[in-house]
Image (cartoon, rainbow, N blue to C red):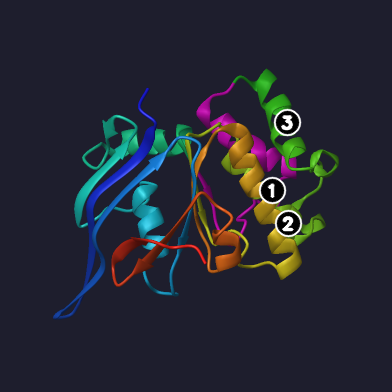
Amino acid sequence: MNDVVLKLKGITKTYHQGDKKLEILKGIDFELKRGEVVSLVGASGTGKSTLLQIAGLLDHPTKGEIWIGDCEVQSASDDKRTALRLGELGFVYQFHHLLPDFTALENVSMPMIIAGVPKAMVKKLATERLAALGLEDRKEHYPSQLSGGEQQRVAIARAIANQPTILFADEPTGNLDEETSARVMANLIDTVRNTGLAAIIATHDRSIAEKMDRMLTLREGKLIESKRD
């Protein structure tokens, strides 16, 4: 079995502003292995979100190749990319983006319903995802009835609802206070390790980043393996 679940080869991203050319990513090469938790750090504006969006098939690079497992997906159709996002990839953002008129259980159920999971299984699986994050007793609550940390844990449960292969998290605790941030990040890392996911997590907090298997720094468009203190 190939343990590499994500491979980026020569990824570049260039924007044009009038006559100016802005190079955000300059030939990124990267591999993520099954079960690995990798942190991505870098100053604001260095392109961390851009890199995650490209790797997560939400944006296209200017040049380069993207491989999900053994499948080269840069040239894949929109339908194929959508199917991969739904079945193989999970996303957690700085803001939870929960649907306000739906309960925690319904929010977590939504990706499974879209993916065609049998209705008889959806409630059971959604409850299990919430229970794994300590939220079973909050499953019938609406987002407005949950704390910021609870909302973000619901977002994590939703991201892993369809048992993806890869989880992308973009500053998932950036909108939380320090204590809540540490607790939610611990929940996130434990969930990734317990489910055998691979994850790449962008964070500005070096102390959090150092708890992961590898720490990568994005600087001047290049990805650098960071040395630990």
Which structural element holds mark 3?
Answer: helix
From the image, tell me which residue sits under label 1: 187
- How far apart are the two marked residues, 3 and 2, measured between alpha carbons? 20 Å
Residue 80 within the magenta-colored segment of the rendering = no
User: Looking at the image, do the residues carrying marks 3 and 2 touch, with CB atoms under 8 Å apart?
Assistant: no
Q: Is residue 177 visible?
A: no
How many C-alpha atoms fall within 10 Å of the one at disc 3: few (<14), some, or many (≥20)?
Answer: some
The residue tagged with tag 2: helix, strand or loop? helix
Which amino acid type is shown beneath numbered disc 2?
Answer: Arg
User: Which residue range is magenta in the image?
Assistant: 90-117
Q: Which residue is mark 2?
A: 183
Q: Nearer the viewer, residue 24 or 43?
A: 43
Q: Nearer the viewer, residue 21 or 171?
A: 171
Q: Quick check: 173 left or right of 64?
A: right
The quarter of the rendered structure image containing the N terminus is top left
- Do the numbered discs 1 and 3 sit on residues whose CB atoms are within 8 Å? no
Residue at 55%, 59% in the rendered image: 210
Which residue was labeled with disc 3? 128
Q: Name the residue at the right extreme.
A: 137
Residue type at mark 3 is Glu
Q: Secondary structure at mark 1?
A: helix
Picture layout, residue 85 above or below residue 202: above
Residue 49 is tagged as none
| Residue at 59%, 55% in the rendered image | 211
Looking at the image, is mark 3 or mark 2 earlier in the sequence?
3
In magenta segment, residue 104: yes
Evaluate if marks 1 and 2 touch, with contact meaning CB atoms under 8 Å apart.
yes
Q: Amino acid at mark 1?
A: Asn
- Residue 107 in picture, x, y percent from top left: 66, 43
Choose the circle earlier in sequence order: 1 or 3: 3
> Percent from the top left, x then y, of residue 189?
62, 47
